[in-house]
Amino acid sequence: MSNRSGDVGGHSLSEAMGSIGQLPGVGGLGPGFEGGGSALPEVPPAGEHPVGGPEEQSVSLIKSFAYSSGNFGSGMWYALNNFILPLFLDPLHMPVPLIGLLSSTRSAEGAILQPLVGVWSDRIWHPRFGRRRIFIARFVPICALFVILTAFVPGWAKLGPFHAIQQFFNVPEARFVLILVAVFIFIFTLTFNIMYDPYQALLADITPEVFRGRVNGVFQAFGSFGQAAILIVGAFFSDLIGGVPGLFVFCGVMLALTFIPTLFGIREPRSLSGTTATHRYTARDYWNGLRADPQIQLYFANQAFLWFGINAITPFLTLYAIHEAGFNDSNALFLSFILLLSSAIFVWPFGLLGDRIGLKQVFLMGMICMAGATIAGIFTHQMLPLFVVVAVAGVGNAAQTASSFPLMTRIVPADQMGLYTGLESLVTSIAAPASAAIAGLLISHYGYLAMFPFVAAMFLLSLIPLAILRMERSVVQQKKRQEALAAQSAGETGE
């Protein structure tokens, strides 16, 4: 990676990790609790950017679009990983379990890295790009470059220095190509994930709590339309851009371009609401912070089961369509397009609905649709019924996507959003590759249909913690009610 990748906001990587604190074996993390109160992240000194929490800011449609534009390119990246990358790896004779692992948008290294990045983004400040956008400025170009280069790796492996390395280590050519491709995929996955968690945490920094559902709906709609766009290009125009390798080039260019409005069109607040103290986190603080609020535990349990289900099917959907349902490459990509189009159409309305009837209710609706569609997939093998099944799954995915992250923002402290976004990534970085590996092994032994019962079971299990979760019982919401009552009492006393 670039030498600049360890230099965010003018801080070296070692300096940043030192400022996070001393956590044995990893680095300091986690919300601390001293004397019964929440210890909060270090606050950068004041600067020229606006001060105050998002409650003091309005959210225009232009601002929502500027923030969300980067998610259009991110959506292309996700579709490339989930649906196109397997088509790239399968002709290279990559083993099915490894296809699942490499096509996982969350990789195993994120279990350690993502929480560190989340806390890091809470603490730093760059004069021009703030605490979150600096990660975009540093890591999106690296990610886009390696996405583009990956398209050419199989050909380059036989040329020049790569061929010399292969000869030096005496590795068979086919295996060397797989190793080289895996290295490039690892780099663009790593750099994307370093960037994406701070980018997602930016939503809570710039958006009042009451509007987060609808802004997240716009954000997720951009992502869904980005995924649908690259699949349309792949299904109908791939010959014009050079087939599957051309889609890598297309994705890399669009990823870089679509983040420009986000990078230069958003101003981050200098201070986050609720920031009152500084603290160096320890492992005990981190553990105590999780134990202090059962509602956060329930949310992360739901996310673990959810991602065990999602990532057990997404890397293999196109391969299932080809090897089991008899689709060609274009029809397989069109099947994925139907899934993502239904998500794109419904995600913004579900964001509005979440603000109106409640995020948890919309989340439950989504999980029920996804579980039902997966169960139906066990018995559906024809093209037209499969299109209907994946469309229903897309509607369910839209509902859970529109409500999931805003729900988390309601139950975690606003000034620790990066920390908890990183913690959520820790959960998904364990669940996603593990589920892909398990599904890959099931497919290797029993065929592609074996993944459907496993996925359905995970979605049904995810409903249990979600049904128990009560946002109003979270520590954050209880504190807000206490502050409101105290303010009301003070006002009555003043009168």
Image (cartoon, rainbow, N blue to C red):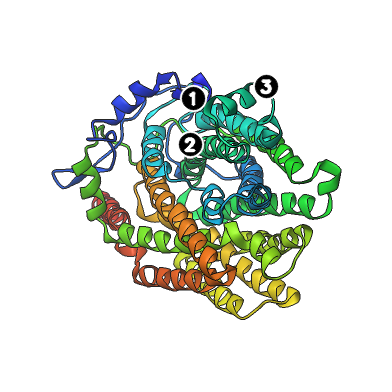
Vertical comparison of 483 with 21: above or below: below
Looking at this rendering, what residue extends furthest in the bottom direction?
A: 379
Q: Which numbered tag is attached to residue 377?
A: none
Of the numbered discs 3 and 2, the one sitting upstream in the chain is 3
How far across and down, in percent of the image, does residue 27 sit?
Answer: 28, 33
On the question of residue 170 being in view, the answer is yes
Name the residue tied to disc 2.
194
Name the residue tied to disc 3.
160
How far across and down, in percent of the image, does residue 217 sit?
Answer: 59, 56
Q: CA distance from mark 1 to mark 2?
A: 10 Å
Query: Is the Cβ of the residue at disc 3 closer than 8 Å to that at disc 2?
Result: no
Work out whether residue 355 or residue 429 is closer to the camera in this orientation and state it: 429
The residue lying at 13 percent from left, 44 percent from top is 35
The residue lying at 57 percent from left, 45 percent from top is 59
Which is closer to the viewer, label 3 or label 1?
A: 3
Of the numbered discs 1 and 2, the one sitting upstream in the chain is 1
Q: CA distance from mark 3 to mark 1?
A: 27 Å
Name the residue tied to disc 1.
5
How far across and down, in percent of the image, does residue 164 sit?
Answer: 61, 23
The residue lying at 51 percent from left, 67 percent from top is 445
Three-letter code for the amino acid on which mark 3 is drawn: Gly
Vertical comparison of 16 with 372: above or below: above
